[in-house]
Amino acid sequence: MVLPALLILTAAPTVAQAEAMASKKQWDELYLAWAAVKPDAVPEGDRARVAKALSKGCAALASSDAVMAQSLGEKAVQLAEDADAMLCSAKAAVKNDQRTEAEAMLRTGRKHFADDDRFALELGRMLLSENDSAGALKELQAIGPKSKLKKEATPLLKKALTMEAEAGSAKADVRATEKRLNPREVAVAERGGGSITNTGSSTYESGVDDEGRRTRGNAYFRFRYFNGQRDFGQRADYEGRVQAALEEARTASNRLLGTSRQKPTDVILYSKSEFTMHHGAQAARSVAGFYSENAIRMNDTAEINPRNQTVLVHEYVHAVLDEVAHFKAMRVPIWLNEGLATWVEWRYDGSDGPPPAVQNELRGAATHGALPSLRQMAGRALISMGNPRLAYDTSGAAVHLLLKTGGPENLLGLFDDVGGGQALEVVFNRRYGRTLAEFEEKLADELKSR
């Protein structure tokens, strides 16, 4: 069999073997041989030669297999800071829709190889494709008149200048519209304060966690695999879709709650078999991911479709609320936690509150005295209730009523207070001017009248 031979090779590959595989264009075998090898396990004098062999594979596969090309390039960069490998890996990342990865690699190369204009050229090209004319202009203008790449950079530079001129004429109108539609966020941004956004870098960088697992993260998310031996490059397409989905969830949280998670959120990526083993076959078939123990746990076989995108928005809200509650969200009633995530889900899908079908359901339950008790839902998982869907919808409607009277800031303040150790009844009465029992009566009356 081929597999045992590859496993032996992975345990102790040599420079000669790497170069022999490269000469035979055995790119898959070359990658498998070195994928799990840490740089410290390779003699310092051999690293550049191995990196060169891996870099050749990246270049050879750049047009036919961008995922493997990126993997080979990234492994080469791990072993030695090679400019060709960095450029090849970055270009492959762009093809794989891993643009944040590409930008990180290009900026690293820009820093380490300041005289190599190829990094500025590729950065400018990529930023132009994303309509970031200002960023592209900055990079392209750094290419000097005597550079060999000036001829290639000139049309890109002209395009960036044209885009900037067109954008400049519209900026005043856009700014006025922003102030009219969302004055609070604009005012906070102009003061340079507040918690509307996380001002950290959105560029993804590779690293290693405390258990030796490869990570890839930025100021908002840190991705790692449940299986520490699985290489990120082999999952480029899926990881890119998860990144995009969670970035959208973060944007929704900022827009609807006025805040997002300030500390990076761990995102653990499971294979289908891993997810099934740990969370059950039913969850593996139907759940895109969930938040637990300070991490969003992703089922990597789940399609990132509109429904699963909404689920991820819901789970990201749990990550935000856990942080607001000083990572003591278990002190807050479950109906409040699930209710706020459900409300954000409704708003994300375009409803101001409970959607019409949900309103009808709640009206009927309230009229017949069949609403689940908030007290019962305080410490019990809603999925275990007799009618889980009604439990989630009642919780969402309760939060909708609280938000109508106090807004997101007051409700997030409750999470802050209760997570910090204050008694729920006292905090609730102080912030909403009634007891929980009185609020529950008001909720039932409100739902009956809708």
Image: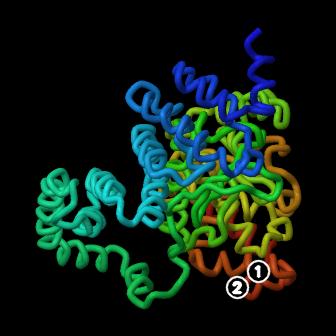
Three-letter code for the amino acid on which mark 1 is drawn:
Phe
Does 408 sit above or below residue 343? below
User: Quick one: which residue is furthest to the bottom in this view?
Assistant: 191
Kindly identify the residue that appears in the image at 23 percent across and 72 percent down.
174
Left or right of residue 222, residue 419 in this image: right
According to the picture, the residue beneath numbered tag 2 turns out to be 431
Does 60 sit above or below residue 46? above
Q: Nearer the viewer, residue 380 or 353?
A: 380
Marks 1 and 2 in Cβ contact (< 8 Å): yes
Q: Nearer the viewer, residue 363 or 156?
A: 156
Does 233 sit above or below residue 351? above
- Name the mark on residue 428: 1
Three-letter code for the amino acid on which mark 2 is drawn:
Arg
Kindly identify the residue that appears in the image at 52 percent across and 23 percent down.
23
Q: Nearer the viewer, residue 224 or 90?
A: 90
Number of numbered markers: 2
